[in-house]
Amino acid sequence: MTDITAVSRGSGRNPVAPGAGRTVASAVPRSLVARLARGVNAAAGAETVRTIAPLTGEPLAELPQSTPADVERAYRLARQAQRDWAAQPVRRRAAVLLRFHDLLLRRQDEALDLIQAETGKSRLHAFDEILSVAMAARYYGRRAPGQLRDHRRNGALPVLTHTVEARRPKGVVGQISPWNFPLELSVGDALPAFAAGNAVVNKPDTQTALTALWARELLVEAGLPAELWQVVVGDGPVVGPEVVERADYVSFTGSTRTGREVAQRAAARLVGASLELGGKNAMLVLSDADLDQAAAGAVRACFSSAGQLCVSVERLFVHRSVADAFLARFAERTRAMRLGTGLAYGADMGSLASAGQLEVVTRHVEEAVKAGATVLAGGQARPDVGPFFFEPTILDGVTPEMAVCAEETFGPVVSVYRFDTEEEAVAAANSTPYGLNSSVWTRNTRHGARLAARLRTGTVNINEGYAAAYGSVASPMGGMGDSGLGRRHGTEGILRYTEAQTIATQRIMPIRPAFGLDEQAFAAVLTGGLRALKAMGFK
């Protein structure tokens, strides 16, 4: 068995996957950038901002910047388009999603190139977004008509009251989407909004706006009215509040700090909001876990998209009896991960997305090591591969005073902790204001399910890191505590974009004394009726 205490910082560097030959410049030519940029709602001659390719640090795109006046115009156009769209039958709206599903799978290489170019992630991790969006498109394309149809409800008085619950679109949804999953968190969240009869004004992160603009083009090709999805691009503090201030509903994915500000602005206008925010997600390896499977799963859970997922695992709790054996396997797999810049399959992990992300990751690791933590794998930047690369890193001996212990790193760094009892592990996993995702590894899945019920997170995966729950698009996904409000996916994921309307028709007699009954007799009749309804099992 490998002695994990013998593994020290700098005892090996992650290998580099061979390049694929294609460059970002050839995959994302200027002609494509110019075409997509025309989809931004910005005035002619608007100021522009330059984005870069994280894989290489080279310039990627020049994008026009929207102003508050542009946001106002975007909402005006969206509202005009929304009225006609809402009047279309739900099945006709849902059919657009199904056509989009087919187009996305057929032309996925275009999306993969853009996602890699804008985020720096590996191609396999970019493909995760294709999967997520395609599954959501199929799900809502098939299910939306049933989810949005009128539902007969029990009326105030059986037979005499006919009651229907209807669903009406909110109107125009203001959507603010982040850079880390630019396809899934833009169009993936917009699809149910469109199916429900809404328009969307989307502010993607500037760094990854091309991916959102490409998705908009594809959805228009699938039959979505072009003005129904408006895209504005600009500095968050300038454009973001304008998007929130005009929305009939707000969909936000991002940091907890910004999410609180969005929630306050929406609440001041009595407008609803769904917020998917940060996480400090935990993975629990129980004493009976299959250690090889758990080690492979930990690599996926911690280092997919270079750890830049809200659902990524950053805290790893391992039963003391199997800790050394598990960590030896996990560290070996982690040190073998291939870093790569190629626009092709083959690399196990790509780059961080920006200099800012690299600074946070570097600071968390260096401060922890200086305070006594041990690096079991990784622990260093890799400028020889690309400007923002950092090796997948495992830290042992992390203590509460270290920033990496409680703050969200949002990078390829996981801290390891040992536990003796499951009660101790559950308490430690729950000892955070966040509550987004968690993972349990055990051979006894029934026991795992019982333990999962004690974890305070919106999703729990048994014998998987995050993909099993996130990919179950028929079930809701979202956070508890500081990880947000509301849910995407499932019925909740589409009904959040609707208003419930109850339509009740009273027949034969009013709900007041009638047919010669005085008030006392009326009260006596209804009292007897209520008792009879309960006795007969009416709900």
Image (cartoon, rainbow, N blue to C red):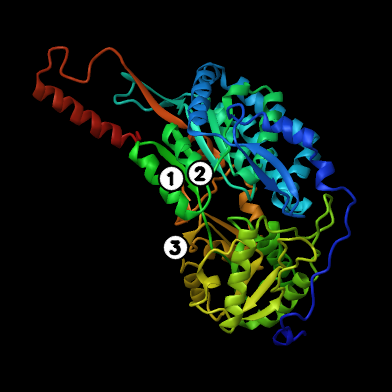
The one of 129 and 524 positioned closer to us in this rendering: 129
Can you give x and y, in whole percent of width and height, for residue 303 in the image? 69, 62
Q: Which mark is residue 433?
A: 3
Earlier residue among tags 1 and 3: 1
Please, is residue 127 above or below residue 17 in the view?
A: above
Q: In which quarter of the image is the N terminus?
A: bottom right
Q: Residue at x 37, y 28 (%)?
A: 154
Q: State which quadrant residue 412 falls in.
A: bottom right
Earlier residue among tags 3 and 2: 2
As measured in the structure, the alpha-carbon distance from the residue carrying label 1 to the one carrying label 3 is 19 Å
Which amino acid lies under the numbered mark 3 shown in the image of this protein?
A: Pro
Q: How crowded is mark 2: few (under 14 residues within 10 Å), some or many (20 or more)?
A: many
Q: Which type of secondary structure does the marked residue at label 3 adopt?
A: loop
Q: Do the residues labelled 1 and 2 touch (CB within 8 Å)?
A: yes
In the picture of the structure, the residue carrying the numbered disc 2 is 252
In the picture of the structure, the residue carrying the numbered disc 1 is 262
Q: Which type of secondary structure does the marked residue at label 2 adopt?
A: strand
Left or right position of 246 against 129: left
Q: Do the residues labelled 1 and 3 touch (CB within 8 Å)?
A: no
As measured in the structure, the alpha-carbon distance from the residue carrying label 3 to the one carrying label 2 is 19 Å
Can you give x and y, in whole percent of width and height, for residue 27 in the image? 82, 42
Report the label total: 3
